[in-house]
Image (spheres, helix red, strand yellow):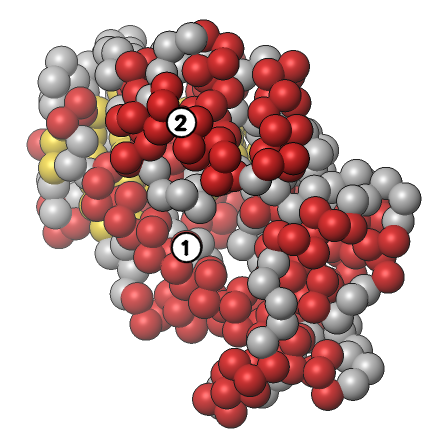
Amino acid sequence: MRLLSDSPSHTLADNSVVCLMAPTASGKTALAYELYDTGRYELISVDSALIYRDMNIGTAKPRSAELQGYPHHLVNIIDPIQSYSVAEFVTDVAGLIDSCHQNDKIPLLIGGTMMYYMALLDGLSPVPDSNDSVRQQVEQWRQAEGISTLYSYLGKVDPSSHQRLKPADTQRITRAVEVYLQTNIPISDWQRKPKKALAHNTAQQWHALTVMPDRAWLHTRIEQRLDIMWQEGLVAEVLGLLERYPLTPNLPAMRCVGYRQVLEYLVHVDHPVFEQPHLDKVQFYDAFEPFDETNAKQAQQNNTRQQTGHSIKPNNPLEVLACQQMQNKALYATRQLAKRQYTWLRKLTQLPSLSSGTPSIFSPPNTINNPMNSAVDNQTIVQPFTTMAQAKNYLF
């Protein structure tokens, strides 16, 4: 193996693949730009929200000028009404990695969708994608009879999945029913089949860098970024999406943090956008609980933050409460997202698949400059850090 001697990334081999994994708002993008400027990297987005066109503010998507200067693969690839499976993501990344290496670049996978990283590092079960006709059939069934009917059906055809899933887990229940109807095999049986991961490729050297910063510091960053989103017009962005696309509340795009809370707010204030002929108003109003004025007032009293959202102009006291509730719920949901990301990151660093066939190297951050931690053939190197600066030191 030839180590790079003429670039800042002295420790990385030509066949390297770098995963920069960290929770939302932790500073991944800034480091990615620095690495891109060295001329050695191509950027591959690992973010299930950045894939959508016209969803810019709420996803913290780099601006158009930034994307021109720092092009990202897998950004703006589908419309919000379309779907994009984890299997499709893995297939796309496999091709992009090969392309990067052919161009003498190191692929830098950057983003916060930990399920995508898990698929790359631990592998996917060979569960087939649902075809469009089956997906449409199940969605019509769900709309007609409710998710509880699908959940009961799952109990008959796939007891294992029925026991594992919560009754309100619409996305996974729907997917399990789709798989069974399409293959006549329970999804739980598919999931027990052997996995194969891109990181097991012995021709590549994978570096899995996990950054888990201080929680209090991250919560401050999350709050600041959400304030910017309100000021830049997240509500107006969602209204524009509703006017342009035949959206439904259960689309993956509309389950993204921030967008979900804005949809709920628009329902609570009975916004006229839902009268658009291409929207099913009933679906949106059924998707959310009625506005709880008492809880909203209590939350407002407990909230010492100054209300932001300069582009939001509530017309009456109830709308003011609904607006504040929306912002509080979005903040809470983003913090919960970060909490889940921490859990995923800890799980990723302990994957048994990384040490079976492709042994992992677990090194504490204070050993990152040790030559023994540089690239080793046919291994996935897992490096945990607590700051983005430590990750930078590893890569430069």
Q: Which residue is mark 1?
A: 337
The residue shown at (13%, 51%) is 366
Q: Which residue is mark 2?
A: 154
Crowding at label 1, few (<14), some or many (≥20) Cα neighbours within 10 Å?
Answer: some
Residue type beneath disc 2: Leu
Question: Which mark is first along the chain, 1 or 2?
Answer: 2
Q: Position of residue 382 (x, y in %)?
A: 20, 35
Hey, which quadrant is residue 134 in on the image? top right
> In the picture provided, is 306 more to the left or to the right than 247?
left
Residue type beneath disc 1: Leu
Q: Is residue 326 in sight in this rendering?
A: yes
Label for residue 369? none
Residue farthest along the right direction in this orientation? 277
Q: Is residue 378 above or below residue 350?
A: above
Q: Is residue 245 above or below residue 155?
A: below
Hey, which quadrant is residue 51 in on the image? top right
The residue shown at (61%, 29%) is 141
Q: Position of residue 57 (x, y in %)?
A: 66, 55
The residue shown at (32%, 72%) is 216
Q: Secondary structure at mark 1?
A: helix
> In the picture provided, is 8 more to the left or to the right than 142?
left
- Residue toward you, 204 or 129: 129
The residue shown at (65%, 22%) is 136
Task: For the C terminus, give its image quadrant.
Answer: top left
Q: Is residue 37 in sight in this rendering?
A: no
> In the picture provided, is 58 more to the left or to the right than 393?
right
Q: CA distance from mark 2 to mark 1?
A: 28 Å
